[in-house]
Image (tube, helix red, strand yellow):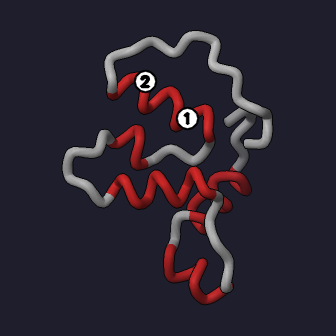
Amino acid sequence: MKGKTPQSEYVIEVLRDGRVLKEAHILPPQVTEVSLILGREAACPAAVAEANTVAQMVTAVAQACDREVEDVEVEAID
């Protein structure tokens, strides 16, 4: 994520807090939900479990598979 600010760090914390999400009746972004689900598995690499954007997930999965990320085009919706 470009230009992290204290506010963006707080938003990420909130979007990864199941209790807060349930109380607010909102769903996390899909990539965050996937990383939370995968993070429950003992063998899941930390980078995958902590991914908050599509670009972070692509990089984390590539690293977990011992592959280099080659100019993966990800829409700038993160």
**Camera-side residue: 29 or 9?**
29
Q: Amino acid at mark 1?
A: Gln
Where in the figure is residue 49, as x and y percent of width and height?
Answer: 40, 48
Instruction: Tell me if label 2 and label 1 are in contact, CB under 8 Å.
Output: no
Residue depicted at x 34% and y 42%:
46
In this image, 36 relative to 3: left or right?
A: left
Residue 53 vs 16, above or below: the answer is above
Looking at the image, residue 6 lies above or below residue 53: below
Which residue in the protein does label 2 denote?
Answer: 62
* Local crowd size for mark 2, using a 10 Å CA cut-off: few (<14), some (14–19), many (≥20): some
Q: Measure the C-alpha gap from mark 2 to mark 1.
A: 10 Å
Q: Residue furthest left?
A: 42
Q: Amino acid at mark 2?
A: Ala
Point out which mark residue 56 bears.
1
Give percent across and percent down for residue 19.
51, 82
Question: Which residue is found at the position 50% from the left and 44% from the top?
Answer: 51
Screen quadrant of the C terminus: top right
Image point 57% across, 84% down: which residue?
Answer: 22
In the figure, is residue 53 to the left or right of 65? right
Q: Residues within 10 Å of mark 1 (few under 14, many from 20)?
A: some
Specify the quadrant that holds the N terminus.
top right
The image position of residue 65, as x and y in percent, is 33, 24
Q: Residue at the location (25% across, 55% down)?
A: 41
Q: Earlier in the sequence, mark 2 or mark 1?
A: 1
User: Which quadrant would residue 62 be assigned to in this image?
Assistant: top left
On screen, residue 64 versus residue 29, left or right, reads left
Q: Position of residue 25 (x, y in %)?
A: 67, 85
Left or right side of 30 for 73: right
